[in-house]
Image (cartoon, rainbow, N blue to C red):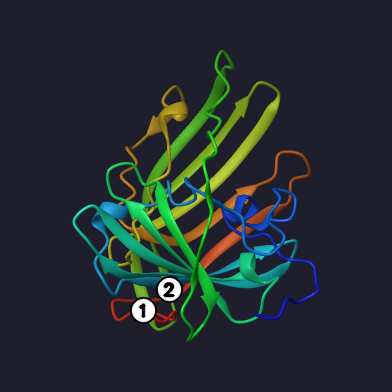
Amino acid sequence: MRPIHRPAVIAGAFALALWCGEAAGHPDQPYVTDGMFSNWDVAALKAGDWVEHEEIVLEQPVRTRLACVAVEEEVAWIEYTGPVLSMWEETALLVSVRKKDRLIDKALWGGIGYVPREIKVEHVKTAGPAEGVERIGTGVVREETLKVGEKDLTCEKVAVDYKSGESPFRNRVWTSSDVPFRYNPPVAHLADLKWDGKAAYPGGLVKREVENPANGQVAATVLVGWGHDATRALKEK
């Protein structure tokens, strides 16, 4: 696996934790944390499910692909390819994710088409929402149709606008039951908002817009493909 000497583009909710390998003392491999799939309903996955998204961060589009390549009684095996591996050419990450708590207990990494090697999974305690901070704002749930390729998808749109302390937050999420990899983010910290409708997050992520409260820039994620015929990119022994 030949390293590429270029800046890695950080994309997605879990990208930062993966990309910081060198800072964490792992300059020769990706840095994998056990909770990187905590926002996905792993228990609902079926072997072959896959999704591909284009993420626009700092106006530079990049692609991310998630594929469920096997399902066992207690875990789902998910293969990841995308920008967080851009330090190395043509590699993939394969992880086993426990259904009961969505935590990774094993990670394999290697060149596409080759047998991977096992790499360390770091336990990182996820910081929850700040306690004692008042959140004031609204959440609105509506049905909306988005077109992806040639297909019209009926989506649930969740629009959230609120302030946490002095920081404003503006997020938009569209999900569809037609798309695998059900998106299932934590929402308990938003219970005090004034809601119009009840968010169900019925399926996979079709679109997401998150505004940076510091500078007002919007990071966007859009679905570009999905299916149910995924196979392993990494060889088995």
Q: Residue 164's x, y, as percent?
A: 62, 25
Instruction: Classify residue 236 by image quadrant.
Output: bottom left
> What SS does tag 2 mark?
strand
One can see residue 235 in this view:
yes
Question: Along the horizontal axis of the image, is 120 left or right of 103?
Answer: right
Q: How crowded is mark 1: few (under 14 residues within 10 Å), some or many (20 or more)?
A: few
Q: Which of 91 and 168 is in front in this view?
A: 91
One can see residue 144 in this view:
no
Query: Quick one: which residue is furthest to the top in this view?
Result: 132
Q: Residue 114's x, y, as percent?
A: 49, 84
The tally of labels here is 2
**Distance from Cα at disc 2 to Cα at disc 1:** 6 Å
Q: Quadrant of the C terminus?
A: bottom left
Q: Nearer the viewer, residue 162 or 184?
A: 184
Badge 1 is on which residue?
A: 151
Q: Which residue does the image show at 66% across and 21% down from the upper left?
A: 165
Q: Residues within 10 Å of mark 2 (few under 14, many from 20)?
A: few
Say what amino acid the circle numbered 1 marks.
Lys
Instruction: Classify residue 3 by image quadrant.
Output: bottom right
Query: Quick one: which residue is furthest to the left in this view?
Result: 73
Q: Which of 96 and 61 is in front in this view?
A: 96
Q: Residue 146's x, y, as percent?
A: 42, 67
Q: Which residue does the image show at 62% across and 61% down from the upper left?
A: 30
- Asked whether disc 2 touches disc 1, contact meaning CB atoms under 8 Å apart, the reply is yes
Q: Which residue does the image show at 37% across and 60% down from the upper left?
A: 204
Badge 2 is on which residue?
A: 147
Position of 118 relative to 191 (above/below)? below
> What SS does tag 1 mark?
strand
Q: Which residue does the image show at 36% across and 54% down from the upper left?
A: 97
Say what amino acid the circle numbered 2 marks.
Lys
Instruction: Classify residue 129 by image quadrant.
Output: top right
